[in-house]
Structure formats: C-alpha cells, structure tokens
Amino acid sequence: MAKHHQASGTLCVQWLCPGPAQQRALLELALRCLRDDRLEIRRALRQRDNATVRERLHRAKGAICTLWPDPETLARLEAVHRQLPRRGSQLWSQAAALESRLLQLEQAMLASLDALGGDPIAQEQQPAPP
C-alpha cells in the first residue's frame, strides 16, 4: 500500500513540476510542512487545544489534497475533524491513528525524495559524526 501512495504522490509532484530539481524542492517543502503540522497536532492534542488541532488538520489536508493524494489519510483527517468538539478516548485514539498515518505519508515522501537524489531533511536531523 505504501508503494501505491508513493507512486500517486510522485506522479502528482511530477505533473506539478517539470524537472527533478523543482520536484525535489516541492517535495522538501511539502515534507517540512507535513512534519511541522504533524508535530503541532501532537502537541495540541496533548494540551487539548482543539482550535490548534483544527487549524493544523486543515493545513495538512490542503497539502495532502494538492501534493500527495491519499484517500485513507484524508478519511482519517475528516474523522478526527468531526470529533473535535467532543472529548474522550475515541477521539484520542483516532488522533493517534491519524498521526501514525501522517508519519507513513512522510516516509513515502522521503522515499520519493531519496529517489530524486537524497534527503537533506533527514541529514539535517542526524548528529554530525565525531
């Protein structure tokens, strides 16, 4: 399933950008935004900050719809979004599943970025060798 999402996302990025350098830049930007949104959603959920969760879900949904079409992730986004006014264990378990799905999407994007010539984002996060 991950290969399917990688393929559909790669095709979308290839359609939007003519050359590998532009595709790479677009993927890097999308990946940074998705990571930022995912981490902010996690933080806001822990603090029960529904307004921030709603805002970040909306941003993530826009990026996914535009750059990396993934029906399963979009369905999970919608499910959590509908539950936001309520609280309870069902919402938090759905949100945890969504975060896991967003992480899978990041991994598919990283694989496509790697195919275009490496991943400077991952390299930034690794400690420098001694």
Image: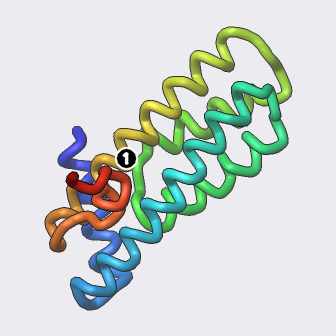
Image vertical order of residue 98 relative to residue 24, above or below: above
Residue 2, above or below 37: above
Residue 118 percent across, percent down from the top left: 19, 67
**At 35% from the left edge and 40% from the top edge, which residue is drawn?**
104
> Which residue is denoted by mark 1 in the rendering?
105
Query: Residue 33 placed where, x, y %?
Result: 53, 61
Image point 80% across, 17% down: which residue?
87
Residue pushed farthest front?
A: 130
| Depth order, front residue of 104/39 | 39
Q: Nearer the viewer, residue 92 or 5?
A: 92
Residue 102 in the image: x percent, y percent? 45, 41
Position of 14 with respect to 16 (left or right) is: left
Q: Which image quadrant is residue 13 in?
A: bottom left
Quarter of the figure with residue 46: top right
From the viewer's perspective, tell me whether residue 50 is left or right of residue 16: right
Quadrant in which residue 23 is drawn:
bottom left
Quick one: SS at disc 1? Answer: helix
Q: Position of residue 9 (x, y in %)?
A: 32, 61
How crowded is the residue under tag 1: few (<14 C-alpha within 10 Å), some, or many (20+)?
many
8 sits to left or right of 55 = left
Residue farthest top in this picture = 89
